[in-house]
Amino acid sequence: LAKTTQPISMDSYEGQEVNITCSHNNIATNDYITWYQQFPSQGPRFIIQGYKTKVTNEVASLFIPADRKSSTLSLPRVSLSDTAVYYCLVGGPNAGNMLTFGGGTRLMVKP
Amino acid sequence: DAGVIQSPRHEVTEMGQEVTLRCKPISGHNSLFWYRQTMMRGLELLIYFNNNVPIDDSGMPEDRFSAKMPNASFSTLKIQPSEPRDSAVYFCASSSPGLALQFFGPGTRLTVL
């Protein structure tokens, strides 16, 4: 399973755009890149998933360069409620949906 | 769909007692995962089932831990005997064929005194 590296923590202010970058140098051809969000006392929640280029949904955007060795989660205009831990994972159906969670990035949004 | 259901949500027990955690995956999902989360070790995969069969249990800490999946809609994680170091939040997650993502339950917060 490909290993991911992401910053341990980030601070931001309400209304700003937050970009969290994740490195996954050993990503396999069949791997997807998936981001989860976890609030205290809750289970991780799926945010967005992509394979290449750019993916956007109502919550976030995911930018993936051509070599797919990294990805950037972009949260537009964050609010206090976006304070959470964000996990970047790579994996795919061929691995039986096995996903390995790293330490995640602890995002703190300040007023 | 109700999502992944876990019970109990909180469990407080004394050292040496048996603890059983329960999970109902999302209907139609054929993969089920048990995780443990602590401040020190983060989110750890304990065991993974595919079509009710345990595929990888390398994350199970020791023989005190056991997991079963008697059918597609139910799984248990048992700790016997429990120890204070087992205190953690235990999550169950399920996944569907062809999906490279998992859906997590709300977790069970276990405290062993």
Image (cartoon, rainbow, N blue to C red):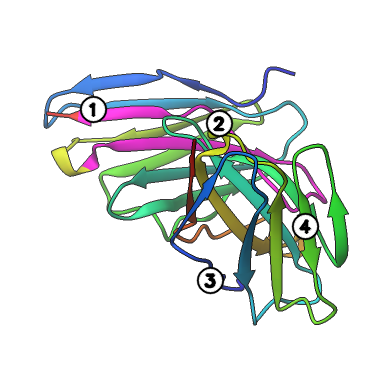
Residue position marked by numbered label 4 in the rendering: A62
The N terminus of chain B: image quadrant:
top right
Q: Amino acid at mark 3?
A: Thr
Percent coordinates x, y for residue B76 in the rendering: 45, 30
| Mark 2 nearby-residue class (10 Å; few <14, some 14–19, many ≥20) | few
| Mark 3 nearby-residue class (10 Å; few <14, some 14–19, many ≥20) | some
Q: Report, in whole angstroms, how far the alpha carbon at label 3 lies from the one at label 2.
A: 24 Å
Q: Nearer the viewer, mark 1 or mark 4?
A: 4
Q: Amino acid at mark 1?
A: Glu
Residue position marked by numbered label 3 in the rendering: A5
**Is residue A59 shown in magenta?**
no
Q: Nearer the viewer, mark 3 or mark 2?
A: 2
Looking at the rendered structure, which numbered label has been put on residue A81? Answer: 2
> Which picture quadrant has residue A34?
bottom right
Q: Report, in whole angstroms, how far the alpha carbon at label 1 lies from the one at label 3.
A: 38 Å
| Mark 1 nearby-residue class (10 Å; few <14, some 14–19, many ≥20) | some
Q: Amino acid at mark 4?
A: Leu
Q: Nearer the viewer, mark 2 or mark 1?
A: 2
First reached walking from the N terminus: tag 4 or tag 2: 4
First reached walking from the N terminus: tag 3 or tag 2: 3
Q: Amino acid at mark 2?
A: Ser
The C terminus of chain B: image quadrant:
top left
Q: Which residues are magenta?
A: B86-111
Task: Give the letter of the chain under mark 1.
Answer: B
Check if mark 1 and mark 4 are on a common chain: no
Q: Compared to A58, does A86 lie above or below?
A: below
